[in-house]
Image (cartoon, rainbow, N blue to C red):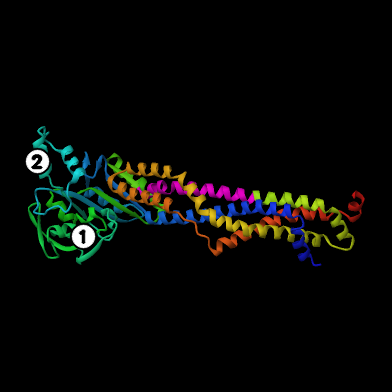
């Protein structure tokens, strides 16, 4: 009988023990497979989140959150100096304002309870009579937001998910002409089309295009060149926020430091790297847990098989002595036990792969549920930054939280092959060492002890 067939037969020589070893090993191998799949899934999601965040830094006036707070806007002169910083590839400026009574446009959004609450909270006159309150609420119209920029190629600074021109064309962002792009909802509400005009700040503004931003808020806005809005609104050389694009991710810290030196306490400076760390923190926690569990399950599987094979080879001392007495070499004896261990391990691997396939997503969901609260705290931390990065960061954080909820491990052929490779490694480590040690004993010594 050949060494392979003899090793295969010996693997099931003791049915109860073989079944016990297979069950225990299958759990270890299944857990190894689950942790490896979790690592792969989480790492892919981390890479995706980081690539979506990009290499940007946002600068906004200190103490100002959109149209709330107090302080001064950034000046054009201070912003111009940003482009002179090493590794800065693009500087995109944004100015925002509200149109109220100085326009002939009707807002696309109804005030609703939330809008009326803001109106009452910011009203300069306290209304005590209930009839007056109802009348004020009835007459109140939502202000129309205008966002102006010097670069339409980077719409991240406009806080929109997309920027699709449905008719007309984009304006030249560097012009000072009174031209605008109108959101689809606002255009529909006021029967505007490309080539139409409307009044803003009591001046005529030409509609050069209609834009779909992918959400109701953006589609109710007006988008203009920044120089035009600065002139119309009387905010010459004033800027609400600046999006700074850096040459590479590893240069962000250096550029951020120089920006802080330049603006001191006059601006809040938040980098995408800060947001990135907050967004992927829960994913990194899952990755760390998965890695430790992967290492632990591999070690556990190796120890289980190692102890099992030590017990088996000790039981077969006489058999080993007989084999050596009839001329079997140490290598032949070692190979026989290695084959036996390999058969046990491959049998365990089949069961383990099945277990891992069914348990991968439930276990991953348990890991996710323990880290969702961390993601929520990260989102709250991001919300404490200035308005633009708050919106961008909140979207990324929410995306990361959504990514946590939507994480799903997939078993592919590569995963199965890695599982089998792990099983082979466990089998070799667990069988070769004890069998080689016992095979070095002389036949005479074995017979004497028997």
Q: Is residue 424 above or below residue 266?
A: below
Q: Earlier in the sequence, mark 2 or mark 1?
A: 2
In this view of the protein, which residue sits in the foreground, 304 or 435?
304
Q: Which quarter of the figure has residue 45?
A: bottom left
Asked whether residue 277 is in view, the answer is yes
- Residue density around tag 2, few if under 14, some if 14–19, many if 20 or more, within 10 Å: few
Q: Is residue 156 left or right of residue 197?
A: right
Residue 288 located within the stretch drawn in magenta:
yes
Quadrant holding the N terminus: bottom right
* Residue named by callout 1: 173
Q: Identify the residue at horizontal 8%, vertical 37% (top origin).
A: 132
Observer-nearest of 7 and 385: 7
Q: CA distance from mark 2 to mark 1?
A: 41 Å
Q: Secondary structure at mark 2?
A: helix
196 sits to left or right of 247: left
Residue 54 in view, yes or no: no
Return the residue found at the far top.
128
Q: Position of residue 355 (x, y in %)?
A: 58, 55
Q: Is residue 72 located in the magenta-colored stretch of the structure?
A: no
Q: Secondary structure at mark 1?
A: loop
In which image quadrant can residue 323 be found? Answer: bottom right
Query: Mark 2 or 1, which is nearer the eye?
Result: 2
Name the residue beneath numbered marker 2: 135
Magenta-tinted stretch: 271-299
Mark 2 touches mark 1? (CB < 8 Å): no
In the image: residue 52, left or right of residue 143: right
Q: Residue at x 27, y 57 (%)?
A: 155
Looking at the picture, how far across and down is residue 422, in whole percent? 63, 57
Name the chief secondary structure element in magenta: helix
x and y, in percent, of residue 283 in the image: 46, 49
């Amino acid at each position: 009988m050949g060494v392979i067939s003899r090793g295969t037969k010996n693997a099931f020589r003791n049915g109860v023990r073989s079944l016990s070893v297979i069950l225990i090993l299958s759990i270890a191998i299944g857990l190894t497979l689950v942790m490896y799949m979790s690592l792969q899934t989480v790492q892919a999601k981390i890479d995706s989140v980081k690539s979506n965040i990009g290499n940007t830094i946002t600068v906004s006036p200190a103490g100002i959150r959109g149209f709330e707070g107090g302080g001064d806007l950034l000046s054009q002169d201070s912003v111009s100096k940003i482009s002179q910083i090493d590794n800065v590839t693009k500087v995109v400026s944004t100015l925002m304002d509200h149109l109220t009574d100085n326009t002939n446009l009707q807002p696309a959004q109804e005030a609703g309870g939330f809008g009326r609450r803001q109106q009452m909270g910011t009203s300069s006159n306290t209304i005590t009579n209930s009839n007056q309150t109802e009348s004020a609420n009835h007459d109140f119209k939502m202000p129309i937001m205008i966002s102006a920029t010097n670069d339409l190629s980077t719409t991240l600074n406009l806080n929109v998910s997309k920027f699709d021109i449905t008719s007309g064309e984009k304006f030249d962002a560097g012009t000072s002409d009174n031209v605008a792009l109108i959101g689809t909802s606002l255009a529909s509400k006021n029967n505007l089309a490309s080539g139409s005009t409307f009044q803003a700040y009591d001046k005529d503004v030409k509609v050069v295009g209609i834009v779909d931003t992918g959400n109701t808020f953006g589609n109710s806005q007006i988008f203009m060149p920044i120089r035009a809005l600065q002139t119309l609104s009387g905010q010459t050389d004033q800027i609400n926020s600046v999006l700074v694009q850096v040459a590479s991710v590893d240069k962000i810290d250096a550029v951020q430091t120089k920006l802080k030196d330049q603006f001191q306490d006059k601006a809040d400076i938040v980098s995408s790297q800060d947001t990135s760390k907050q967004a992927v923190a829960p994913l990194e926690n899952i990755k760390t847990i998965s890695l430790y569990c992967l290492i632990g399950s591999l070690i556990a599987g190796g120890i289980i098989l190692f102890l099992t094979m030590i017990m088996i080879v000790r039981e077969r001392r006489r058999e080993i002595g007989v084999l050596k007495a009839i001329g079997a070499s140490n290598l032949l004896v070692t190979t026989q036990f290695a084959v036996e261990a390999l058969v046990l391990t491959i049998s365990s691997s089949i069961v383990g792969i099945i277990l891992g396939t069914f348990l991968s997503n439930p276990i991953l969901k348990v890991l996710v549920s323990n880290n969702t609260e961390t993601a929520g705290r990260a989102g709250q931390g991001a919300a404490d930054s200035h308005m633009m990065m708050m919106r961008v960061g909140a979207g990324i954080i929410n995306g990361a939280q959504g990514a946590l909820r939507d994480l799903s491990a997939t078993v592919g052929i590569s995963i199965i092959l890695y599982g089998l490779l792990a099983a082979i490694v466990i089998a070799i480590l667990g069988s070769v060492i004890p069998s080689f040690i016992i095979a070095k004993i002389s036949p005479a010594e074995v017979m004497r002890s028997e």
